[in-house]
Image (spheres, helix red, strand yellow):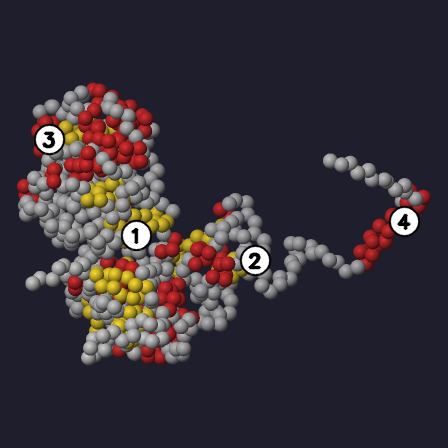
Amino acid sequence: MIAPAKPDLVTVNIDGQEIAVPKGTNVIEAARLVNVDVPHYCYHPKLSVVGNCRMCLIEMGMPAVDPATKAPIMDPATGKQKINWIPRPQIGCGTNVSPGLHVKTTSPMVKDAREGVMEFLLINHPLDCPICDQAGECKLQEQATGYGRGYSRFVEQKNVKPKRTQLGPRVTLDDERCILCSRCIRFSKEIAKDDVLGFVDRGSYSTLTCYPGKKLENNYSLNTVDICPVGALTSTDFRFKMRVWFLKQTNAIDTESSVGANTVVWSREGTIYRITPRRNDEVNDTWLADSARVLYKVVKAADRLAATETIEALVARAAALFKSAPGAIAVVGSGRSTLEEHFLTRHLANALKASAQLVSRVGQGDKLLISADRNPNVRGALVTGLIKTLPTQQLTDLAAQIDAGKIKVVVAINEDLSAAGLTAAQLAKVAIVYLGAHANATSAAAKVVFPTLTVFEKSGTLVNQQFRIQKTLKAVPAAAGATDDLVVLSLLVAAAGGATLPAELASLWKVIAAEVPALATMSFANLPETGLVLDATPFAALPFVEGETLHYKPAQPAVAAATA
Amino acid sequence: MAVITVERKPLTFLERTYLPQIAGGLKTTFKHLIAPKKTLEYPEQRPAIPVGYRGVPTLVKDPNGREKCVSCQLCEFVCPPKAIRITPGEIPADQADRAHVEKGPQAFDIDMLRCIYCGLCQEVCPEEAIFLQNQFSMSGYTRAEMVNHKDRLYELGGTLPDAHHKWDKKKAAEEHGNTH
C-alpha cells in the first residue's frame, strides 16, 4: 500500500520561531527564511557543502522521547516537550533540517564559537582593508564587525605571503587574505568543469594555487572573484580602479547571447567600472561569463558615432530618401535591439511597405551561459511580429534585390551590412540610412547616420531563449551627440508617414500591450526583476539554433548551425 | 500696532558743551598710544596657530620620505562638500621600498573652493596621511588655481612623525622569517 503523498515540508524551530521548510534544506537556508543571519564563508547555495570554515556553528537539539516507549518526555517547568540540546556546536551548512529540530543561533556557546573562529581567521589576515578591493563587500569585514571579538590578542608577527600572484589572465590572487574556504576550487570543479585550482601545503603554509602548468583561464574564471568571501581573488580588470561604495548598481541583462544572464552594472558618474552577475535561479543562478563583463567597454569606445547635425535635419534627409524610392526600401533590424525597438522597427517597415529582416549571429554554445545564438533578442522580434522566420547569417536575398535594382534604400539598424555579406559595390549602389552606436563600413557608406545608444545607455526589454522577457535598465547617461534609438525610430516612423508613436517606455508599452496579444497584460513598470516567461507555442516549429545551456533544454534537437 | 511715545530727556548744560565726551574720547586714544599692541601687521606678521587648528588639508609623507596615502578613498567618501577627488593607482612591483604597499594615488585633488575645513578627512584616514595643518589662507585668480593637486598637497604637508610605521611592520615580519 502506498502512503498518501505528503507535502515535503518539515517544521523546525529557529531561535523560538517555528517554520516549515522543504526537506533537505540546511539550517543556514532555513534561518534565512525567518530572517536570522547565520554567518558563513565556505557555504554557497549553488555549490556543494564542505563545512570547512566553521563560521556557521549553531546549537541544535531534538525533542526528547523515552527510548523504550517513544513517548515524548515533558519538561515540568515549561509544560512543553523537553529538548535534548547537543552539548557541542554543529555546523549549520552541513545540517539538514529534520522534523522538530530546534536551533539556537544567539546562545552564549554560539557567540563564543563565532568569536573563536573569527579570531583564528584574523590571526594571519593582513587587515589591509584600505588597499583591498573587497572592502565594502567583504564578508570577513562584515562578520568581524558583527560577530568578532572587536580587538586582537595576537602580538606575534603575521605571516607574509605572495600578494600579487596571477592565477590567470583575469584573476589576481592575494594569498595573505585567503581564508581557505575553497569556494573557488569547488566552483572550478563543479560549475566551470575546469578543475585547475587546489590547496597545497599544510597549516599556515596552506596556499591556493593552480595545477602546475595550468592557468585559471576559462571563460568563467571571474565568478571565483564574485564568490570569494574575502579579497583574496580580485579581478585584474577592476583592481584598484574604484571603491565599491561609490558605485551605483543598475540591473541589466547580458547581451552577448540569447541566454540573457542577469547582471548588475556598477557605475559612477557616467562611467561603468564593472559588471557582475545578479542571481536568477531560472536563468543564470549566480554566474556570469567573463566575456560578458567586458562588454561595458563599448560605451567609451573610440569609434563611437556622434551627430554633426541636429536630429531634425537628419530625419528630414531620411524622409527625402524614403520619398525618393517608394516601394524599393528594405529594413534590416538587429537581433541586438530591444523588444521596444523591434516594435518600432516593425512600424517603420509597415509605413515604408518594406520587408524587414534580421541578421543571425551564430557561434559555439558553451553549454553553460553562452548559447549558440549570439543575438540576445531574436525572439523579441518574433514576439513583436517584426519577423516571421528565423534570420539568416548572410543577406543574400537583399544582395540579389540590390543587384537587380529592386531596392534603392536600406535602413540598417545596428547591423553592419558588409559583415552580413553585402559587398562595397552593393553598399554604394543603395542609399543607406544607418542607426548605430559605433562606426563601421555601413556607417561610412551611409547617406544618413543616426548615432544611437549602447545597451548600457538605454532601458528596454529582451526576450531570451526561454522566451523569458527581461528588463535591462539604463546605467549611464547617453553619450554626447547620440540619440535614443526609440526617439530616432519613432521620428522615422512619423517621417515615413506612419502613426505617431511615443518614444518613452511607459507610453510606448501601452501601445505595445494594445497591439501585441502576447504582451497584452504587461507594462514596463510591472515586469518582475526575474522576468516573465511568454508563451512559446506559436514559435515551436521554428528551428532555433540553441543547444542545451544552464536551465535551458531545447524543445527539439538543435539544428546544425550550417542551415542558418 | 500700538505707538509708544518715548519722552526725550533734555540735555544738561555740560552735555550741551560736549567737552566731557571729548575728554573721555581723548583719554581712550592716549591710553592706546602707550598700551601694548593687540593687532598684527598681516601678512608680514602671522598669528601663532593653536594646537588642533584646522587649516588647509594637506598630504604628509612618513619620516622616510615615502607617500603614506594608499588611495583608499575614505576621505573622498566622507567629505561632506565632495571637495576631494582621487584617482587610485597601483605601485609597480619594481619599487623595492614601497611595492608591498601595492596601492597609491595616481591623482589626488582637493578643491579648496568646496572645502569647508571640517577635518573629517583627517579623522577618517586609516593611514594618517591627510592632516589639516596650520596653513589657513588660500587665494588664486582662477578656479583651477584653487584646486590643490597631489604635488601641491605634499608640498604643503611636508613630513610628520609616524608612531606606527604600519607598512614597515610587514617588512619586519618578512625579514623575521614569516614568509610562507
Say what secondary structure mark 4 lies in.
helix
Q: Is residue B137 visible?
A: yes
Say what secondary structure mark 2 lies in.
loop
Quadrant in which the N terminus of chain B is drawn? top right
Say what secondary structure mark 3 lies in.
helix
Judge whether A269 appears above or below A323 on screen.
Answer: below
Residue A78 placement (x, y as % from top left): 35, 72
Have a look at marks 1 and 2 and say if they share a chain: no
| Residue A399 numbered tag | 3
CA gap between label 3 and label 1 equals 40 Å
Say what secondary structure mark 1 lies in.
strand
Q: Residue at x 22, y 31 (%)?
A: A515
Mark 2 vs mark 4: give the one in front: 4
Mark 1 vs mark 2: give the one in front: 1
Judge whether B90 appears above or below A91 on screen.
Answer: above
Residue B148 placement (x, y as % from top left): 49, 53
Q: Residues within 10 Å of mark 1 (few under 14, many from 20)?
A: many
A190 vs A434, nearest the viewer: A190
Quadrant in which the C terminus of chain B is drawn? bottom left
Disc 3: host chain: A
**Mark 4–mark 1 CB contact (< 8 Å):** no
Residue B62 placement (x, y as % from top left): 47, 67
- Judging by the rendered image, the residue that carries numbered circle 1 is A274
A499 vs B25, nearest the viewer: A499
**Mark 3–mark 4 CB contact (< 8 Å):** no
Q: Is residue A491 left or right of residue B144?
A: left
CA gap between label 1 and label 2 equals 38 Å
Mark 3 vs mark 4: give the one in front: 4
Judge whether A66 appears above or below A471 on screen.
Answer: below
- Judging by the rendered image, the residue that carries numbered circle 4 is B20
- Judging by the rendered image, the residue that carries numbered circle 2 is B55
